[in-house]
Amino acid sequence: PNYYRRASFNSYQSNTSDEDMVEIAGANMDFSLTDDVPPLDRELQDGTVTGTGMNCGTKLMDFLDEPIPGVGTYEDFNTIDWVREKSRDRDRHREITSKSKESLWALIKSLSDAFSGWLVMLLVGLMAGAIAGLIDMVAHWMTDLKEGVCLVGFWFNHEHCCWTSDEMTFEQRDNCPQWKSWSELFIDQSEGAGAYILNYFMYVGWALTFAFLAVSLVRVFAPYACGSGIPEIKTILSGFIIRGYLGKWTLIIKTVTLVLAVSSGLSLGKEGPLVHVACCCGNIVCHLFTKYRRNEAKRREVLSAAAAAGVSVAFGAPIGGVLFSLEEVSYYFPLKTLWRSFFAALVAAFTLRSINPFGNSRLVLFYVEFHSPWHLLELVPFILLGIFGGLWGAFFIRANIAWCRKRKTTRLGKYPVLEVLTVTALTAIVAFPNDYTKMSTSGLISELFNDCGLLDSSQLCDYVNDVNSTKAVDDLPDRAAGKGVYAAIWQLALALVFKIVITIFTFGMKVPSGLFIPSMAVGAIAGRLLGIGMEQLAYYHHDWLIFKGWCGPGADCITPGLYAMVGAAACLGGVTRMTVSLVVIMFELTGGLEYIVPLMAAVMTSKWVSDAIGREGIYEAHIRLNGYPFLEAKEEFTHRTLAMDVMRPRRCDPPLTCFTQDGMKVEDVETIISETTYSGFPVVVSKESQRLVGFVLRRDLIISIESGRKRQDGIVSTSLIYFTEHCPVQPPNSPAPLKLRSVLDLCPFTVTDHTPMEIVVDIFRKLGLRQCLVTHNGRLLGIVTKKDILKHIAQMANQDPDSIMFN
Amino acid sequence: PNYYRRASFNSYQSNTSDEDMVEIAGANMDFSLTDDVPPLDRELQDGTVTGTGMNCGTKLMDFLDEPIPGVGTYEDFNTIDWVREKSRDRDRHREITSKSKESLWALIKSLSDAFSGWLVMLLVGLMAGAIAGLIDMVAHWMTDLKEGVCLVGFWFNHEHCCWTSDEMTFEQRDNCPQWKSWSELFIDQSEGAGAYILNYFMYVGWALTFAFLAVSLVRVFAPYACGSGIPEIKTILSGFIIRGYLGKWTLIIKTVTLVLAVSSGLSLGKEGPLVHVACCCGNIVCHLFTKYRRNEAKRREVLSAAAAAGVSVAFGAPIGGVLFSLEEVSYYFPLKTLWRSFFAALVAAFTLRSINPFGNSRLVLFYVEFHSPWHLLELVPFILLGIFGGLWGAFFIRANIAWCRKRKTTRLGKYPVLEVLTVTALTAIVAFPNDYTKMSTSGLISELFNDCGLLDSSQLCDYVNDVNSTKAVDDLPDRAAGKGVYAAIWQLALALVFKIVITIFTFGMKVPSGLFIPSMAVGAIAGRLLGIGMEQLAYYHHDWLIFKGWCGPGADCITPGLYAMVGAAACLGGVTRMTVSLVVIMFELTGGLEYIVPLMAAVMTSKWVSDAIGREGIYEAHIRLNGYPFLEAKEEFTHRTLAMDVMRPRRCDPPLTCFTQDGMKVEDVETIISETTYSGFPVVVSKESQRLVGFVLRRDLIISIESGRKRQDGIVSTSLIYFTEHCPVQPPNSPAPLKLRSVLDLCPFTVTDHTPMEIVVDIFRKLGLRQCLVTHNGRLLGIVTKKDILKHIAQMANQDPDSIMFN
């Protein structure tokens, strides 16, 4: 029979039911059946169920018509199958390309399809830029509203109100007649205890009003609008469906409440939420284009780019935004997306610049003008700052997660409005007396980053001017600190403690809250303090060995602003564990190409220190806290388990529920569907051989059977279901068979039972699978889903495997 | 028998030979055999062949001891299996980690292992930076040597020789008494026909000498040192072995000949070769560390980072270097590599800056000092430059590939020395009379990028000074062009034509030759010409509608240097098809964050235009010309073929050569090995069932059988080979069996015959496979290798499938 075997081997294109016969008959096979099977008006029957899905090898489906609505879509809280989605898109693309040769109209359609990707990016960039500009302007105005009002027009913020004066420095702001603080307005006093108390009262009052509005709007209209949104976006981008998370309501409410939250003076930033807002824009724009609306994978490409645009407008750093999206947020980042993300990020940044919310036509948030060189020995304090940043990052993550867990598990979580109001009141009451906490956090960072010029009138620049030089800012020598600087040091130290404590309680509340700005503020304060210390040390002790040779008297050797920059980067790195993107953002932010090495030294130290204490960044920690099904792409799977240890069914469980390719009745299938909750079922040649034919999704199966019953005559409960290419001639009185090959995925991914889990995890990550079948010597054994893997990873890390939510 | 089936299904951990019995017996099986098989002193036999490979599920192999040398290594011109390599590294890592708890010494070893990655990067960065600095200095000196010599010391270049003068402008260089041109030295004349002819003669003579030395050294010592090296590095990084391509001889000879080639005045740059040099450094450093020496995948991580370091030192653009490596060169770029690449790139740049080869302590090659704003309307000429760049890029690629093909196929290729000398002589003869081609190409670009200040004495800056202003460079208004500018325009136009033509013939010769600098030069000349044109137009016609409102008289509205920058980016983009990395390199190069939008507009236009004419960039074109087995990651596979159309055996071929898991004799296996040339063989349960057990590599098999025959008693030609976990008791007089399960890959990748090729290609790309087995309903049908896929792609593109070289 060897000859026959070989024949069978070569005739692999013969139909599958024949193969089954061979299997059942064992070595004793007969080929005569093969050609007997008539095509059995296959076209007609096929037409009824031209579904979609991974139609490997079957004829091209028309996705634009989509005969059975719903086939190929996903339910809420489900994981998408990237391979299937990409396959669908390629089919769609091929059809458009092949049609384009037929008529001019089809050609135009094909061109517009090819161009729609760029159009989407343009729209996302424009929208994200415009919304960011709006948020900046309104937040600026509302922040100033806490202190006073502009008489020329209440809609002007403090800076716009005093537009006439050319140079706008810290002190001159107070000498502008058009701007009235609340005490000036109501009791016509700008000094004195009464005025102070009134201003204090107004400040706290406005803060509470804003915070209350913010938390109420979030609670009533869009519960998804709270938090930073980055953990959820990471999860969505990894291929998870959360309906409404990127919807228009979330967009509107998040935009409004973000302004309110920022203005309320809470210790939070707008950067993370801006990423969420930009992703909402991306999602909404996707709905305008069939190509992106109908395909979850394509839509995620847009979302990746939108995230880049979000960071781009948050900091005015387009390249940093793209790298942030690549390094931190995105899961699948094809190179095509890189280029488009860059485009979207640039359009967004450009739009923002045109809106010009800061009134200085600078693209970046914290422009730094100094370019003074740094000395190699200064790497020691920079590395110290890195250690501080790492320690703070690790501490913050632990404390914040502990607090959030408490919120989740105790009664605390039941009173979100009260919580927000309490924290806001505390923040406002403590912040007002201290100049450095009273001003907006980004204003504070900006001031800390700056070097002191001769004309600078801020408290931080109150140095003793013992030289009468007309040199430029860059060349100003180190000077002795004056009274103002010493006062500022105390205030900054207090501000540092306050920010460290309050941020822990703020991040995770039910208002939009970003973490970038508070982290940077903590680092900038610490850095500036160290910088001033170093500067004074160098001034008074320039004869010390460490300063000799590079820091003589009258030289400008220490730039405290640079220390603030480095500290900010270190703290941000400790919290988020970003690396390259962070350095790029920092250097775009400040325009200082020459400070990459200090920044990098600090960020690297910070990452090492914080990684040594806890592996997870804040976003991963929040993902795990919330139990999102996110398969971390950065962490290597290090355990030595095999696919058979992870797959279901387990050793003592009943065997895997699977269908046979023929011989099953509609009622059998329906029973199995109703009795189980699995999202899909493998189809095998026969129960005996367990040789795998394909995989069919529950959702597609339900829809197809329903549609078959409705549209096709003679489909009853006793109808036979065929997953084979041809079905045999039915006896005369039997009901019409239901052919379901079109919804059968003929190329399910398989691994052998001996495959190490590290490889399985790699396959899941790189290909974006939802499930994978496990075979042993060609027989179907079990199934591994993404959820199984996540549970297994949690188990191996001694965590509760049931903390993984959702399917 | 259903009950038994289920039992069989659940007992998948029982041995495999049993499963085979089940298969042969068909529905009529018997489980009694299962437990009868004794372990048969398995440990002892296993010990003899503890090889390596993807030992899925078998016990941990000790890679540090490596009992059979050679198992798990690759031959020259072979494709590596990324999954296998990564798996090996993880095993190694796990062992070190688990051992580290045992003793202090092991802990130190484990720590040093973890730290070695960073150490490697540090060394690579230091080496690449040092070599780049050396190349820069020597090339600078030798380029000047063509014109004259320094009397203070012949080892000084022109600039160092005249170090005393503070401001070093273009004209002042000639008024330095220490520097003698050859005519001054020999006939004591600096002007006149005689002096000119002597200088001309010396110029051409030196050029020919350098070129002859370069080509001879390459031919005699290291044939791999020629060309830019980037196509080959791309191929190596995609997982191909070319022994010696990154060896120490290549490094030395490439470094020396690069200096010679650059100095000879040929139209080539040092940027591409520097990437090759940096990769050589990476490869050599890898040899110092077991972790990287023994693992091809880990080594490629280092090479990716080394490529980043190469670009970083070539341009002084660390971030651009990392993005270049990510976008253009690397194939697998895990995020860990991103961070390390950045580190290596930064160390390299820092080393280069410490060496300070340009004598101006600038990190970047072409520092631009202007920051004048650009107007939105200027986007029109920028886009024109983009179109020019795209057209030039497409034209260059076609012409250069045609010429290279001619060189490959005709007798021309037999005389590389003559070819190089001819091109050098032509270049030198044509270049000398024109100031702009006589100077080094990077000097030319630098001059074209610069804006003209009031004190600038170069010909390009010979404007009519009709204003007596003391404004800074940035604010200098547009002026009428003087005689010098008009002369420069003519010279530049001639230089443009010359560069366009000669570069086609230069790139691909048997000397190290980069393409970045010549491409940028072409673009910069075109851009500068357009810029001057625009400037004069705006000056004389500032009342035109298009200039109204933003370009009044006395305003500084057009910056010709910016046009040169944009043109350079456009041309480089047209040739290489880089996008984000190019923009980042350009903006790091020039320090101009404000010019991202013009650069991007031009680069995008250039890419679109050139992509419309030909899809391939110059590197891909050269890869295809040379037939390297490179599976392009950027291009989507768009055809609708299935795995069964691509797999071997084809429909009419004899069936796939495969082994059975038991019952084969040593001599059978040896016959099959000697009769075929396949790199690996599938192992099946039995010829009849064709159910797949695993995959065994030819190389591992040969080594193991040889080793078995040598070390194990009783292994003769008639010994049975067992791939099963246990082997049955042998009859008393039969020879000892050879157990080879340890070299069997128990988790070969499989796809079904209906899998669309687009998915197969995706799997190959993302997982880095070497081969993949094709099954139908659980039976083995055929095999698809990377080469099959490449041939198939070539076939679908109507190219000769046999042009794919190597295995």
Image (cartoon, coloured by chain):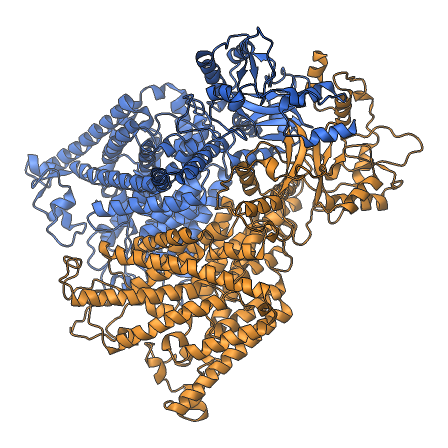
Chain colours: A blue, B orange
Instruction: Name which quarter of the figure residue A652 lies in.
Output: top right
Instruction: Name which quarter of the figure residue B590 lies in.
Output: bottom left
Q: Quick one: B24 or B9, which is closer to the camera?
A: B24
Determine the residue located farthest toward the left in the rendered image. Answer: A188
Q: Is residue A418 visible?
A: no
Q: Quick one: B12 or A224, which is closer to the camera?
A: B12
Determine the residue located farthest toward the right in the rendered image. Answer: B733
Which quadrant is home to the N terminus of chain A? top right
**Residue B589 location in percent, x, y?**
38, 61
Determine the residue located farthest toward the bottom in the rendered image. Answer: B187
Instruction: Name which quarter of the figure residue B31 lies in.
Output: top right
Q: In this picture, is B143 found above or below B234?
A: below
Compared across the picture, whether A180 is left or right of B28 comes to left
**Residue B155 location in percent, x, y?**
49, 80
- Total labels: the figure holds 0
Q: Quick one: B262 or B647, which is closer to the camera?
A: B647
Q: Is residue B546 visible?
A: yes
Report the residue at 37% width, 68% height from top: B445
**Residue B767 location in percent, x, y?**
57, 40
**Residue B689 location in percent, x, y?**
73, 27
Q: In this picture, is A580 found above or below B267?
A: above
Q: In this picture, is B796 found above or below B391?
A: above
Q: In this picture, is A333 found above or below A248?
A: below
Compared across the picture, whether B274 is left or right of A419 comes to right
Q: Quick one: A244 or B670, which is closer to the camera?
A: B670
Report the residue at 46% width, 48% height from top: A605
